[in-house]
Amino acid sequence: MAPKTSKRSRTRYLVALFAAAASMACGPRKPIEVAPVRVAPAPLPSWPDVVGCWEVRMGAWRPALMLGPDERIVTPPSRILIDSTIGTRPYERRNLLLRPAPGATPSVHRYSWWNMGRADSIQLRWTTGFSGVNMSLDHQGDTLRGLAETTWDFDRQVQTADVTMWRVACDAAAPVLAGDSLRRNVPFNPSMHVAERGTLRHYVGGKGVAREWWELVRGKDSLAIVARVESAAGSPTPFIVTLRTDTTYIPRQLEVGGNEDATVTVLGTRTRLGTGSTARTVKTPSGFFVLPESPAVSPWGGLLRRWDRANRPGSFAIPGHSAVHLTVVGRDSVLIGDRRIVLERIEATGSGWGRRTLWADTTGGLIASLGGRSGTFALREGWEAAMPYLLASARLDALRMVRNAADDVKPAQSERFAIVGATVLDGVSDGPRRNAVLLVEDGRIAQIGTRAQVKLAKGVPVVQGRGLTVIPGVRADGWSVSDLGWGPGALADGIVAMRLAGHDDAALREVRAALDRDGGLAPRLLSSSDTVGARVLREGDPADFVIVQGALKEIPDSPSAVRWVSIGGRLYSARALRSQ
């Protein structure tokens, strides 16, 4: 008997033979035709809004690591094109392409792509083939916000950073910086590149109120510092400042978006302030810099670098404004992640600028800024752990300054004196009180009246008030602790009380206790619950008032021609106060 395998082989042979005969009888087999499937150019019709060009702004990486040359691996292009084309190369295959926007500087990554995430989110990827950056972003109108994360092909700590993108025009011919945040006025040049970039958060009263993105764009023989400030309240119009300098940070031009009058153009020995028919020219001073009166803090970083390269002069002239004086007042050691970093603490003062405390690292880069008559504390992202230590240092500086000022400036009269023959605007009476007498006793207003009504005891010091007007002083709100250190100058401007921003109750009590214990020449410090804000002069109130030149008919919002200032019954000459 033949084995079973032989029977099976014969059976398969016979079946194949019959099939071949049937095929020959029916003619040749026709190929099956399949209609071609056309790939849609926009494979994500539910996400039409994300396709296009976007400007990228990243916060500081957390934790802060010293990456050296690897820093470029975690730096994507600062302007990108989110495409609707499906990739074909490795990594990009079956994903959607992600490319630098026209005119933007490419990154070092070989591959980049994007795809849908969960809900209203997208995922972006950049890689060299080994290491790179991943982003997960939520779609919010014309803005993409989310988080970036580093990826490495070896053992290195993962870092994260906040990311914000906003839509821009995909126009290669548009005047743009090399990955800037300005999008106008500086034509793209292949020699230009973003040398540095960062983000600052602005705080008032301990709450974040704004965010500032900045870039330092380097060209062959020029630099540009570009700052973009966006309010946390969601203001539709960002605030943009551009400062152009040479390679040693000597200014050439300053522009403030939306304010042509703030434009400053250096034309050799002359400087033009403003544009158009309202422009005026002034002589360019030696040893000068230009600064905007704006929320942007980054231009102050340019000032610090100019200061370093000029061997740290005592001051810089500001065309069209008062000078800024710079002094190193100390150093602060802070712990950021696992690194101990020493920051230099610098005081910047000027009658038109108030008092500002600046912190710089060893390279001269701006880390934080406090003050400037705004109460704003700006801090680089990633440095939040240093905030309480920096504020404490500024508080100690301010207390030291006002104590020193109290030692240097002595009051002309104290505790008990009378202003005779002046006009008094007390904020209560229907009109000015002419030829009046104001008597101060024990640091308080004892009497206000006519010569007949106020009887002066023998030996009371008299200040002749003919041609002068006594008015309530100004109450300032929202000042920083650095502004407290500007106490003598504030008094000389008629500010007799101030309410500090950015302090909790414990810190405020500490400052007030130090002033009460050690003394100091500064406006009266108000708490949030103080009601001394009313601009009136009443009998029994503390003797805080201002004496100005001339016979006024109403209380001015901002006193001018201040001659004397009384704070707590101590009468100071405004001239002596301004000398501090």
Image (tube, rainbow, N blue to C red):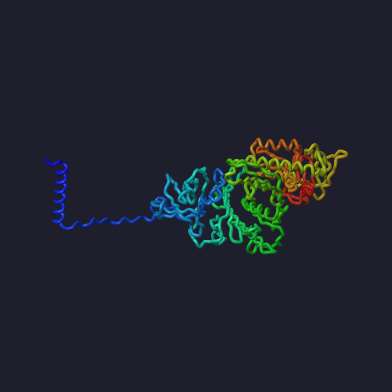
* Total tally of numbered discs in the picture: 0
Please tell me which residue lies in front, 18 or 192: 18
Q: In the image, what residue occupies the spot 58% across and 60% down? A: 219
Q: In the image, what residue occupies the spot 56% across and 45% down? A: 65
- With respect to residue 540, does 43 lie above or below? below
Q: Find the residue positioned furthest to the front.
A: 1
Compared across the picture, whether 548 is left or right of 303 comes to: right
Please tell me which residue lies in front, 66 or 257: 66
Compared across the picture, whether 573 is left or right of 220 comes to: right
Q: Is residue 137 visible?
A: no
Q: In the image, what residue occupies the spot 49% across and 60% down? A: 171
Q: Is residue 467 visible?
A: yes
Residue 43 coordinates in the image, percent (x, y): 38, 53
Q: Quadrant of residue 520?
A: top right
Compared across the picture, whether 321 is left or right of 462 comes to: left
Please tell me which residue lies in front, 526 or 240: 240
- With respect to residue 120, does 172 lie above or below? below
Q: In the image, what residue occupies the spot 27% across and 55% down? A: 34
Residue 449 coordinates in the image, percent (x, y): 80, 42
Residue 443 coordinates in the image, percent (x, y): 78, 38
Compared across the picture, whether 15 is left or right of 565 comes to: left
Residue 526 coordinates in the image, percent (x, y): 69, 39
Q: Find the residue positioned furthest to the left.
A: 1
Quarter placement of the N terminus: top left
Q: Quadrant of residue 545?
A: top right
